[in-house]
Image: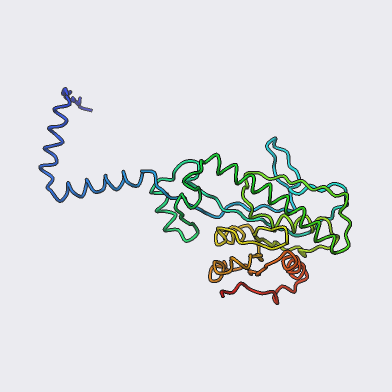
Amino acid sequence: MPNMHFGHGKFTESTIVERLVGHFLRSGLRYNLGLIGVVLCVVLLCMPSAFVTEGPGPTRDVLGTVTLENGKSAEMIVIKGAETHKDSGKLLLTTVNSYGVSSPAINAEVLAAWLNPQSGVLPREAVIPPNQSVEEYTDKAKHEMTGAQDSASSQAFAFLSSQGVDTSNVKVSMNVDEIGGPSAGLMYTLGVIDKLTAANETGGKTIAGTGTIDDKGKVGAIGGIRLKMIGAKRDGATWFLAPKDNCDEVVGHVPDGIRDVQVDTLAEAYAALVKIGQGKGDSLPHCTVG
């Protein structure tokens, strides 16, 4: 093989600048403007945005178990002071994953979410008020989750008492992971009722849902219901209990393979659960607009 020799020149900053200027002059105005435009677009896409992106979050079976921080598993709903009953199906609470809350999402992530029909984009101030820090927002979400659990217990006891079930010595606690906010109230409530009754309410089906629950048993509207239905379908649900006040967002956006059911109160939600378990869910009301 012949010897190959490489010359080594000494490059200075001025030499590099001269060569770059020469390259630009030789390349022509149109080429250079296009190159500058590409660079500016890349820089812009990498800059922080003023938006939060959302996607379908994980679901949790309130009748099942969760993994604790110590790595051990525990029941999501823990009941003491009464006999509990197994159900052959699942009751899934649904969530939304938010990106850009703790640190801003970049414009490229926002653009990708905007183009994805299974994602959502919101102004950051619609999620975190301008006068609220990330820490305050997180603390509020945890407080709302605790309130949802307390409401679920009290409303489940009130409902069971009306059915002649003695709950005077019953204590309920809940194990949750990174779930925040009040939107799991309905599913927690149904989970407590299910575990304290002998009936196999789900009939072996996987039923998802969402909604707050107030001190009168009213099921309240929540955010991100379209994404929650997508997450429910992904995780095997064939039924979805939707708050009546969210029906305008449900109509036209129910994933194939899921049947939505409009509910306005805890009593309606439990009656729907029983009918679904009995195979009589076809007569339950769909969401409608107006």
Q: Residue at x 57, y 53 (%)?
A: 96
Q: Is 19 drawn above or below residue 38 in the view shown? A: above
In the rendered image, the residue lying farthest to the bottom is: 283
Examine the rendered structure and indicate whether residue 158 appears above or below residue 78: below
Residue at (72% x, 44% y) in the render? 175
Q: Residue at x 32, y 46 (%)?
A: 44
State the residue at coordinates (72%, 54%).
188
In the displayed structure image, the side of residue 44 where residue 127 appears, left or right: right
Q: Nearer the viewer, residue 277 or 261?
A: 261
Q: Quadrant of residue 210 in the image?
A: bottom right
Instruction: Choose between 94 and 157: the one closer to the eye.
Output: 157
Question: In which image quadrant can residue 159 be found?
Answer: bottom right
Percent position (x, y) of residue 35?
A: 22, 46
Quarter of the C terminus within the rendering:
bottom right
Along the line of sight, which residue is nearer the eye, 283 or 89?
Answer: 283
Query: Position of 114 compared to 19: left or right?
Result: right
- Quadrant of image for the N terminus: top left
Q: Position of residue 281 (x, y in %)?
A: 71, 73
Q: Based on the displayed image, in which of its 4 quarters is residue 26 positioned?
A: top left
